[in-house]
Amino acid sequence: MRLKLFLQVSLAVLLLFSAVYPSFSQVAPAAYEGMRLPLTAGLGLSSFSPDWRPGRLIGGTLWIDYNPTWVPQRLYGIGIEIEGRDLRFNRSSNQPSDLREDTAGGGVIYTWRRYRQIRPYGKFLMGLGNVDYLTGTGARYNTSRTVTFAGGGLEYDAFHRFWVRADYEYQSWPDFFNAHAPNPGKLDPQGITVGVSYHFNQRSSH
């Protein structure tokens, strides 16, 4: 998968949004005029327990959030997030050779009102997960699953439209019937991501 799917989905979402957004802006209240795209793009470093013998995997994470401004006021804070992660570094000697876990998915994110420079958020996503590694014979084993992600974290308004994000995520990989896994039948990777996001449209109320 190698984040290729994530990039393709992201591009499709952005193209769809660019086609639909003008229709909303034409009927938006005057208070919304001149506002930029309600999008956030971020990049971070992740450290995860792959739930595959002791040890952690490190890699990069990308995310794009869409937080509509045209929803009713009681729904302010709700949005859509798409996320891609590639974990491949820092393998321990206990783990399979060349172990790698990739995920790409999308779902709902909710951001609460900010307190001073900080605002919390929670999210629930669904997508695809891919695991591959080298077996003892040198052959490459590869398998993919539909996975769910749940998590949340904090964002800190560091400078203008740049925010620092600290994120925790728990993943569920069902039906992982692999004799090499520590708990055949299911994987539950979890970890943290620290990164920076850029808010193209920063609302004062959040």
Image (cartoon, rainbow, N blue to C red):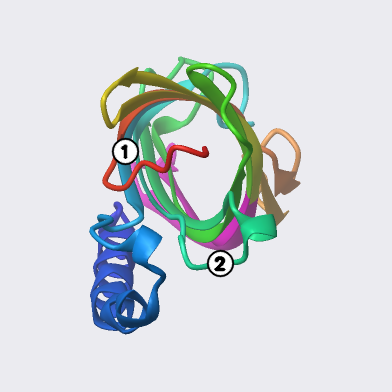
> Of helix, strand and loop, which mostly describes the magenta segment?
strand
Residue 42: name its quadrant: top left
Q: Please check the rendered image and state whether residue 55 is part of the magenta-colored stretch, yes or no.
A: no
User: Where does residue 195 sit, x and y in percent of width and height?
Assistant: 36, 25
Q: Residue at 56% x, 67% y: name it.
A: 71
SS label for mark 1: strand
User: Where does residue 127 sit, x and y in percent of width and height?
Assistant: 53, 61
Residue 170: name its quadrant: top right
Q: Amino acid at mark 1?
A: Gly
Nearer the observer, disc 1 or disc 2?
2
Seen in the picture, residue 112 relative to 68 is either above or below; the reply is above
Apparent side of residue 174 relative to residue 141 in the rendered image (left or right): right
Q: Decide: marks 1, 2 in contact (CB < 8 A)?
A: no
Magenta stretch, residue numbers: 124-148
In the picture of the structure, the residue carrying the numbered disc 1 is 42
Q: Residues within 10 Å of mark 1 (few under 14, many from 20)?
A: some
Seen in the picture, residue 97 relative to 18 is either above or below; the reply is above
Q: Amino acid at mark 2?
A: Val
In the picture of the structure, the residue carrying the numbered disc 2 is 71
Q: Residue at 37% x, 18% y: name it.
A: 90
The answer to whether one can see residue 66 in this image is yes
